Image (cartoon, rainbow, N blue to C red):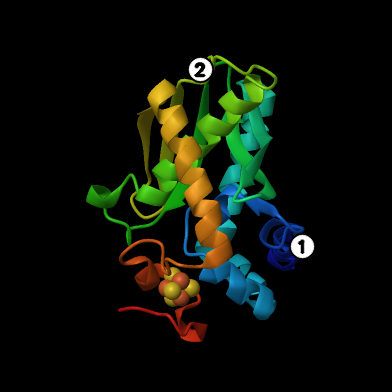
Amino acid sequence: MLINELLKGFIKEAQTYYLPSNNTLWVSMLIQCPYKFRLLREIPSLKALIQLQSNVLIGNLIHKGIEYYIAKFDIGIGERYVRIEKNVDGNHYTITGRVDVVDNNYCYEIKTINTVINDYRIPLRPHIEQLLFYLYMLNKEFNEGEKDYVFIKYSLGYLVYIDLGKYTIKEIEVRFNDYAYNKVDEIIDDRIRNFVKMEKIPLYDGECNYCLFKSWCKYYKR
Ligand code: SF4
């Protein structure tokens, strides 16, 4: 009963998360295979499949618990939405994201993993990219209106891996500077293009191995 109610809530949340309005893209759409989102549009029941994964449910609960303690102990700001505007190839896009924790000069992205992901594989490339995209967006928001100079206010990010299999927590530091700002700016443009044109599917080698949608996908690569 409790689990059902929680699942209903998370599935409802996922409706808005995975299917944003026209030309609004979530950061998560730019760091993984774009075809997943085409499948989500074409087969709406797949949204529930994601939320019904026990590791996703546990991950959601851990996030909510961390948010509770961030508020209770007054540590930074939990779950902050960031939003930037982009013009790519003559089209306008809004990029939006949800950062887990933001403090004065840094941010945290919390990931729950299990033993399927061995220690030597973390940090995972899409997780590093997600954190770098958030640092870029936080800095871009901060510099809004300034044209000639970008002040890097958010210069540090942390990936926090909570391993559900080993009961361990690992914090990985990611630094951010002017060079990263300009580089990420270009990468986000490329990812928007790829999301629209679907030229690179999957986005990373080996991504299909962990894809929940491989049984439905005509591009699945072993
Ligand atoms: S199976 Fe591979 S190509 Fe298909 S949606 Fe998943 S990641 Fe993309």
Q: Earlier in the sequence, mark 2 or mark 1?
A: 1
If the picture is divided into quarters, which one holds ligand 1?
A: bottom left
Instruction: Classify residue 157 as left or right of residue 53.
Output: left
Residue at point 52%, 71% (across, down): 35
- Measured as percent of width and height from the top left, residue 165 is found at 36, 55
Mark 2 and ligand 1: say if the CB distance to the nearest ligand atom is below 8 Å.
Answer: no
Residue lying at 36% horizontally and 49% vertically, measured from the top left: 125
Image height check: is 14 above or below 189?
below
Label 1 SS:
helix
Q: Residue at x 75, y 65 (%)?
A: 8
Q: Is residue 133 visible?
A: yes
The amino acid type found where label 2 is placed reads Ile
Residue picked out by circle 1: 12
Q: Amino acid at mark 1?
A: Lys
Quick check: can you spot residue 131?
A: no
Q: Is residue 138 above or below residue 206?
A: above
Label 2, label 1: how far apart the Cα atoms are: 36 Å
Find out whether the residues at labels 2 and 1 contact each other: C-beta distance under 8 Å: no
Q: Nearer the viewer, residue 15 or 51?
A: 15
Q: Mark number for residue 152?
A: 2
Residue at the extreme front: 90
- Looking at the rendered image, the quarter that the N terminus falls into is bottom right
User: Residue 145's spot in the image, x, y percent?
Assistant: 70, 19
* Residue at 66 percent of width and 72 percent of height: 48
Beta carbon at label 1 within 8 Å of ligand 1: no
Q: Nearer the viewer, residue 187 or 42?
A: 187
Q: Is residue 100 left or right of residue 220?
A: right
Quarter that holds the C terminus = bottom left
Vertical order, 72 against 160 (above or below): above
Q: Which mark is residue 222?
A: none
Q: Secondary structure at mark 2?
A: loop
Q: Nearer the viewer, mark 2 or mark 1?
A: 2
